[in-house]
Image: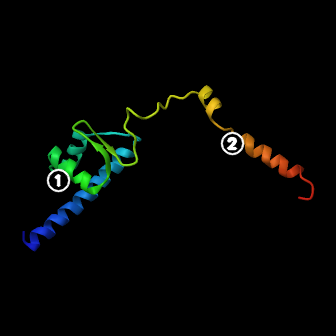
Amino acid sequence: MKIAEVLLLEAYFDELELAVKDRFAQFLGSDVNEIPTEEFRKSLALDGFLLSFEELKSALEQMDVVNAIDKDSITPKGKIPNDMAEPEDAGPEDEEETGTDVAAMAQDQGLDAVKEPGLV
């Protein structure tokens, strides 16, 4: 391979990496854990990167930006696959059991500090 071909390949990969990161930012801005693979491929095609599934998989693995990729979905690094994610439908009764009332704790601590002698 000639030096010019290597430089061209590296430039292409750098541009692809920027496009991938931009598309991830767009998809992840909507708080999704998994991205449909075909939809992601189509969005990259709009940027001029016509990749087969195998090429996309190879590129994403080389970039080290995904946890998992298959023909159906892409799970970016730092995201949990939807089938492993906890439901977000926790009601107020669930919060009382597991949550901590930070406001009440702060109020109690503030009152204790005011009541202590020698602080005034």
Residue 46 shows in this picture: no
Q: Residue at x 47, y 30 (%)?
A: 87
In this figure, which residue is indicated by the disc labeled 2? 102
Q: Is residue 108 left or right of residue 67?
A: right
Image quadrant occupied by the C terminus: bottom right
The reply to whether callout 1 and callout 2 are in contact (CB within 8 Å) is no
Amino acid carrying label 2: it is Val
Q: What element carries label 2?
A: helix
Task: Identify residue for label 1.
Answer: 48
- Depth check: give the residue in front, 48 or 21: 21
Indicate whether 62 appears above or below 69.
below
Give x and y (percent) for residue 15. Answer: 23, 61
Q: Position of residue 43 (x, y in %)?
A: 23, 46
Q: Which of marks 1 and 2 is in front?
A: 2
Q: Where is residue 101 in the image (x, y as percent from the top left)?
A: 69, 38
Question: In this view of the protein, which residue sits in the foreground, 45 or 36?
Answer: 36
